[in-house]
Amino acid sequence: MFDLTGMTALITGASGGIGSSIARALAEQGARLALSGSNPAKLRAFREELNDEFGHDHVEITCDLSNTTQVEELVPATIDTLG
């Protein structure tokens, strides 16, 4: 396929459906992920699952995409968290 080792991706909607499928595919290719969604418990469980399965240090950032303030803070929070 392709190698994303050393790359980082921000995935919105990562706590379910299409977002989690995309996150899994990117993690499988070696990307480090910032997982975003509105359900902190689901995000945490999914992050732990990905970390265990792929051995990366993925992070979770709660964000409700219907909240403008949270959306505006998402990218800066991701940069602060991942460096």
Image (cartoon, rainbow, N blue to C red):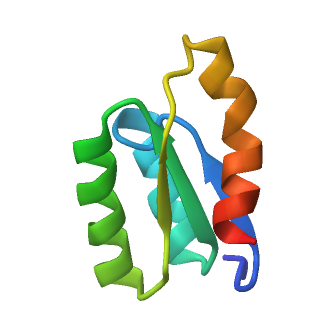
**Residue found at x 37% / y 35%:** 17
Residue 13 x/y as whole percent: 48, 34
Residue 28 x/y as whole percent: 50, 75
Residue 55 x/y as whole percent: 41, 88
In this rendering, position of residue 7 left or right of residue 50: right
In this rendering, position of residue 3 left or right of residue 35: right
| Residue nearest the viewer, comparing 78 with 21 | 78
| Above/below status of 55 relative to 12 | below
In this rendering, position of residue 12 left or right of residue 76: left
| Residue nearest the viewer, comparing 78 with 24 | 78
| Above/below status of 41 relative to 56 | above
Q: How many marks?
A: 0
**Residue found at x 49% / y 70%:** 58
**Residue found at x 31% / y 42%:** 40
**Residue found at x 66% / y 13%:** 68
Q: Quadrant of the N terminus?
A: bottom right
In this rendering, position of residue 16 left or right of residue 41: right
| Above/below status of 56 relative to 62 | below
Q: Quadrant of the C terminus?
A: bottom right
| Above/below status of 31 relative to 66 | below
